[in-house]
Image (cartoon, rainbow, N blue to C red):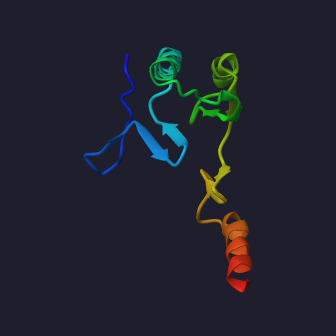
């Protein structure tokens, strides 16, 4: 079973992974088999390239999945299970974007930078 990704609504695009600087996001349907396959892929990447994933800095999100399902898969890799919302590069991810308080930290940070 390989990483199929998720189809973007109203589009012909399917996303299986995203890269930004030294960060990677893998996207797909949740199953124990697919998660273990992804772990195998990452191990093969390490063996073939010599580069190693820092699992201590990695997090596993199970969107629409009970945390009891995420924990037993994340822990053996050394990853932390995580939940939405979270912050990435000072931008909130996975919250209610229409709620004003959601954007308050972003606005305050921008105001500090602009005033300097």
Of 46 and 66, nearer the camera is 46
Residue 37 position, x and y percent, is 47, 17
- Residue at image position (55%, 43%) is 23
Q: Is residue 32 above or below residue 8?
A: above
Q: Nearer the viewer, residue 108 or 70?
A: 108
* Residue sitting at x 59%, y 29%: 53
Task: Identify the residue at the far left of this view.
Answer: 12
Along the viewing direction, whichever of 46 and 89 lies nearer the viewer: 46
Which of 63 and 1 lies nearest the eye of the viewer?
Answer: 1
Outermost residue toward the front in this view: 50
Point out the image quarter for the N terminus. Answer: top left
- Classify the position of the C terminus by image quarter: bottom right
Q: Position of residue 99 (x, y in %)?
A: 65, 65
When asked about the image quadrant of residue 81, the answer is: top right
Q: Quadrant of residue 51?
A: top right
Q: Is residue 45 left or right of residue 23?
A: left
Instruction: Please name the residue shown 65% across and 34% down the image.
Output: 59
47 sits to left or right of 81: left
Task: Tell me which residue sits at (50%, 26%) in the image.
Answer: 30
So how many labels did they put on this image? 0
Quick check: 74 above or below 98? above
List x then y, in percent, for residue 62: 59, 32
Q: From the top left corner, tell me how far across and down residue 106 is, in percent.
A: 67, 68
């Amino acid at each position: 079973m390989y990483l199929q990704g998720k189809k973007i609504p109203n589009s012909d695009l399917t996303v299986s992974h995203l890269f930004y600087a030294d960060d990677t996001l893998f996207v797909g349907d949740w199953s124990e088999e697919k998660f273990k396959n992804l772990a195998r892929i990452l191990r093969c990447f390490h063996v073939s390239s010599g580069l190693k994933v820092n699992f201590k800095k990695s997090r596993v999100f199970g969107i629409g999945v009970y945390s009891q399902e995420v924990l037993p898969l994340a822990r053996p890799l050394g990853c932390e299970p995580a939940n939405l919302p979270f912050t990435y590069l000072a931008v909130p991810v996975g919250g209610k974007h229409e709620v004003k308080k959601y954007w308050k930290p972003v606005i305050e940070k921008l105001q500090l930078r602009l005033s300097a």
